[in-house]
Amino acid sequence: MRNDAPALGQSANPRQTAFGALSRDQISEAQARPRSAFAKLRLRARDLGRLRGAELYDGFLRFIPILWGLGALTPAGALMLVKLAAERWPRGVLINIIVFSWIFIGVSQACAAILNGIAIRDYAKGFGNAFGFGVVGWIFGALAIAAGAAHRLDGPRTVRAVTWVGGYIILLGALAAVGRLAGLQNFQLWPTPVGMILPKSPSVSFYTVTTIFQTEETLGELSTRLLLFFPWTTGLGLGGLAIAFISFLEGSLKWRFIGVAGGVVAVVFSWSRIAIVSMLVIALILAFFRAPFRWRLGITGVVLTTYFFAAMQGFDPIDAVKKAQDGVNGARAGSSLARELIYTKSWEGFLKSPIIGNGWIGDSVHNKETLPIGSHSTIYGLAYTGGAPTLAAFVFAMTLTFVALIWRFLSYDFDDPRRSGALVAIGLILCLLSYCRYEALFNLTLPCLFLFTWLGATLSAERPERARAAAGGANFPATLGARGTRAFAFSPGAARPVAFQKTRSYRDWKNDE
């Protein structure tokens, strides 16, 4: 039996820093030194140098505003993923197949770029695009999945760190409201140090700016949209979806509200139509699967009965979906028209070169607007730039990831509280699937890296029984409800004692550690 009682003269709780607990040696050293400002700075610098694994990741999430203000958010995220992958690589056949299937998307895209450069005898352009973000973005997505699986980046401290990001979005959203009331069309805080050092380019202007909101014009249509920590407004929408869904797992009602509210603000005021629709639809799907079995049966019966009587009255579901899609497209007709032009030209380019694609994005479909062929879509973009092999690699990686997440969800016992985390991961992969047609996902892997790390953590090779024993019986709050409430169980026909088990909160899990 392990004796956890503190030794004589020792505190029962180790001293905490912003990144975790100090060791006994660090505490003794700090107590021996005079408590001057320089001593504290030296101690903190030493703590920063020893950050590893989940502590490093959670610290990154908490310090997002500072990194963003410096223009170093994206480079810092990339370096962190490399460091996490170098520290520990995930074990298990399935997770490694998934990680390397995502890497293979980038490899296939790089081969297509090189082959096209050889075909047109422009070797520099071919090899240059082989190391572009259209290739590197997929590799960083794979590294995020690997880091999440290896370091189990799905614990309550990580959930709390994600809610912090939601809180930052609320504060900056309030600042954006003030700026908008003052009549500003674009609101940028300041030029970032990293942005001033790097040479001018479109990528630098996207990834190193501190833009709160901006007014966009697409084919004569103006719209003012929130941007914040993301290079594109649609990226803010996808990040908001991940923040809202992950924050539902927070055990503290206050922090849960902050995280979910911040995610909703990001989704709504990004004015991303696919993000808004995804939040409504996927939230309903997740709520359905979280409901008790009797509720699911009742809801299914009501829906089928309603559909039966509606069909008798001439209701056509296909026509209803088409009208709904037309309504969404009409909300921002200029943007919809621009995308359709891009998709049409991209498909025509794919048919001309279906095997090796065209290597990189093409010319703009509009004389004045920047609307390159092969952009604004993962499906059409990969088909145009990488050809059928690259598109097939993406379809395989997404399908395998989706199936593996469902298998992981079904492998947990009905009363296992980590089933909540797996269900959230399914919601996140559904968000990615909804974005495939309308956005290039390789541009969003680094800005939304916490989405991909959550997928990896859910797909970790650690067996459920071993993980439950290590975590004291649970890894997550058992429900979306408040602490101490009765469990809103997943279980279809679960035994009555399971349905009334007490909720394990973030604080309970933390005490188990």
Image: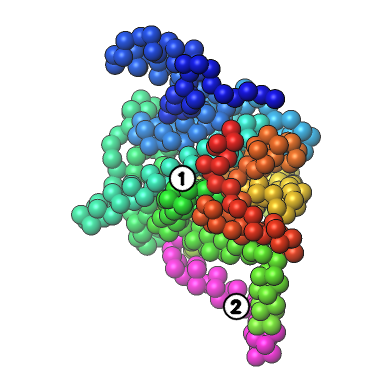
For the residues labelled 1 and 2, the Cα–Cα distance comes to 37 Å
Kindly indicate the quadrant of the structure image that contains residue 132.
top right
Residue 89 placement: quadrant: top right
Other-residue count near label 2 (Cα within 10 Å), few / some / many at <14 / 14–19 / ≥20: few
As for residue 333 lying within the magenta part, the answer is: yes
Where is mark 2, residue-wise? 320
Q: Quadrant where the N terminus lies? A: top right
Estimate the x, y position of residue 414 in percent, counting from the top left: 72, 54
Asked whether 78 or 62 is in front, the reply is 62
**Where is mark 1, residue-wise?**
163
Frontmost of labels 1 and 2 is 1
Residue 145 is at least partly visible in this image = no
Left or right: 70 as drawn, with respect to 114? left
Q: Residues within 10 Å of mark 1 (few under 14, many from 20)?
A: many
Amino acid identity at mark 1: Thr
Magenta part of the chain: 307-335
| Residue type pointed to by label 2 | Ala
Residue at (60% x, 45% y) in the render: 476
| Residue at (52% x, 32% y) in the render | 57
Q: Secondary structure at mark 1?
A: helix
498 vs 84, nearest the viewer: 498
Q: Secondary structure at mark 2?
A: helix
Which residue sits at x=38%, y=44%?
168
Whole-percent x and y of residue 108? Answer: 69, 37
- Of the two numbered discs 1 and 2 on the same chain, state the one appearing first in sequence: 1
What percent of the width, then of the height, locates residue 447? Answer: 49, 40
Q: Which residue, as the protein is rendered here, is positioned at the far bottom? A: 313
